[in-house]
Image: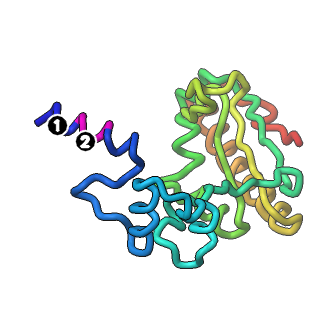
């Protein structure tokens, strides 16, 4: 059976026909028969694609990827100035994101923003190597419009200020000096 299946597969690749178990899509049976019989009157691929409700429209049409125009987005990064060791001991990333992503979702929906925690200790793996970026821990914000960006920037700053206040309180409870600045904003 395996040899028969392999022979059938090889035969269909050579002849350009559909296997016996799979019927040709409606409207293409004639083209398949003509192509296998050597008739040159078979329609060209472009004429099949040009038909609006062609069964091959989705299967063979070239796939286009939506390109994001990064030049039209407003972006900034909130770089954390506290040592990574202290931030991971304090569980900064889960506290910032919130339970079930509540904190970040609230900002993202309010101003249609994209928010990402990235850098060392973020847990976000980037690129084809799927590694954390060799940057300090930071929160990246991007928005489509200037109004949304201003609102999102203020909301992220407020959330980071709340985190800084909580972090400072915990530092004072444990007898450790709190940092003068919790984050800086870069473009």
Q: Which mark is residue 8?
A: 2
Residue at position x 71%, y 36% from top?
Answer: 138
Examine the rendered structure and indicate whether residue 6 appears above or below residue 114: above
Residue at position x 41%, y 49% from top?
Answer: 16
Q: Position of residue 17 (x, y in %)?
A: 37, 53
Q: Is residue 7 magenta?
A: yes
Is most of the magenta stretch helix, strand or loop?
helix
Report the magenta residues as a range: 6-10
Q: Position of residue 167 (x, y in %)?
A: 63, 38
Q: Residues within 10 Å of mark 2 (few under 14, many from 20)?
A: some
Examine the rendered structure and indicate whether residue 68 appears above or below residue 56: above
Residue for badge 1: 4
136 sits left or right of 46 in the view? right
Camera-side residue of 164 and 46:
46
Q: Find numbered disc 2 in the image and state the secondary structure of the residue it sits on.
A: helix
- The reply to whether dot 1 and dot 2 touch (C-beta < 8 Å) is yes
Q: Find numbered disc 1 in the image and state the secondary structure of the residue it sits on.
A: helix
């Amino acid at each position: 059976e395996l040899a028969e299946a392999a022979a059938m597969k090889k035969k269909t690749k050579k002849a350009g026909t559909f296997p016996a178990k799979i019927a040709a899509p409606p409207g293409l049976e004639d083209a398949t028969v003509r192509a296998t019989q050597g008739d040159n009157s078979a329609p060209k691929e472009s004429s099949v694609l040009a038909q609006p409700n062609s069964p091959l429209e989705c299967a063979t049409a070239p796939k286009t990827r939506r390109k994001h125009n990064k030049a039209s987005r407003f972006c900034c990064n909130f770089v954390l100035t506290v040592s990574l060791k202290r931030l991971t001991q304090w569980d900064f990333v889960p506290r910032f994101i919130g339970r079930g992503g509540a904190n970040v979702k609230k900002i993202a929906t309010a101003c249609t923003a994209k928010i990402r925690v990235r850098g060392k200790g973020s847990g976000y793996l980037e690129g084809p190597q799927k590694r954390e970026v060799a940057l300090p821990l930071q929160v990246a914000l991007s928005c489509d419009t200037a109004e949304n960006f201003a609102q999102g920037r203020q909301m992220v700053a407020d959330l980071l200020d709340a985190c800084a206040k909580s972090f400072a309180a915990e530092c004072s409870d444990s007898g450790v000096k709190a940092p003068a600045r919790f984050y800086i904003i870069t473009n």
